[in-house]
Amino acid sequence: MKQMKIVYEGGEGELIEKKSRFIATVRPVESEEEAVAFIAAMKKKYWNATHNCSAFVIGENHQIQRCSDDGEPQGTAGRPMLDVLLGEDVHNTAVVVTRYFGGTLLGTGGLVRAYSRAVQEGLKGSRIIEKKTGALLSIRTDYNGIGKIQYLLGQRGLSITNSEYTDIVVIETLVPETQTAELKEAVTEATNGRAEFLREEAVCFAFLDGEPLIFP
């Protein structure tokens, strides 16, 4: 896994189509059992709904994919919902779209569009982050070197996540796996070998509202 989009916090979205109400509920899931339990919980919550259609994708390569039309005409709900998840390339995500029938038939095309749009609204209401494989680097340098290192990080869109200024400077930064070796080489060259790498820890990380998140 180099990087993948995941749902950090699930959410909801809703739309009305010809008086039918569609409520999308999105949740992060780590296993098929967790997804099945979530779908069952939504069916219990919305027990009086006309349909509770569902879809989920699990795995770094979407190895597990499931969907259900829950009584809607075949292929008009679950598959379009699954296609939205795959199209947005989100991983380890489940969604249930609850429908309250409004009395007007939507037709095959109308159902496909409504269920697809409902999932899109649900994803909009969720917090999605990009989880990356990389390294937590701790670098020690002198005051001459810190400006050069800050410049190199800025060039690559990387941030200083922690810093300590005493008679020397120690900073931490999170670096994607694809950039780690190149950055270390650039830092060594720019500081004429005076910068020291105190720690290099393999981590999975993401940023949420500019704040770093490190996953176990």
Image: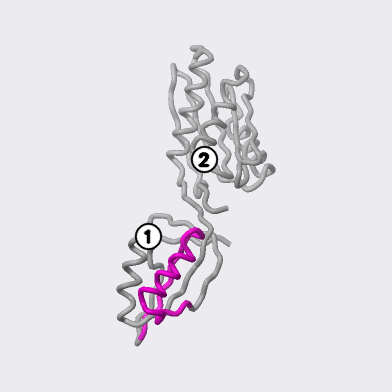
Q: Position of residue 37 (x, y in %)?
A: 66, 41
Three-letter code, disc 2: Asp
Picture quadrant of residue 98: top right
Query: Number of marks in the image?
Result: 2
**Helix, strand or loop status at disc 2:** loop
Between the C-alphas of marks 2 and 1, the distance is 24 Å
Q: Is residue 44 left or right of residue 161?
A: right
Q: Residue at x 45, y 31 (%)?
A: 14
Q: Is residue 20 left or right of residue 29?
A: left
Does residue 8 belong to the magenta stretch? no
Q: On the image, numbered disc 1 is attached to which residue?
A: 156
Q: On the image, numbered disc 2 is attached to which residue?
A: 89
Q: Residue at x 46, y 28 (%)?
A: 117
Give the mark, 2 or 1, whose residue is nearer the N terminus. 2
Say which of marks 2 and 1 sits in front: 1
Q: Position of residue 199 (x, y in %)?
A: 51, 75
Q: Position of residue 126 (x, y in %)?
A: 46, 43
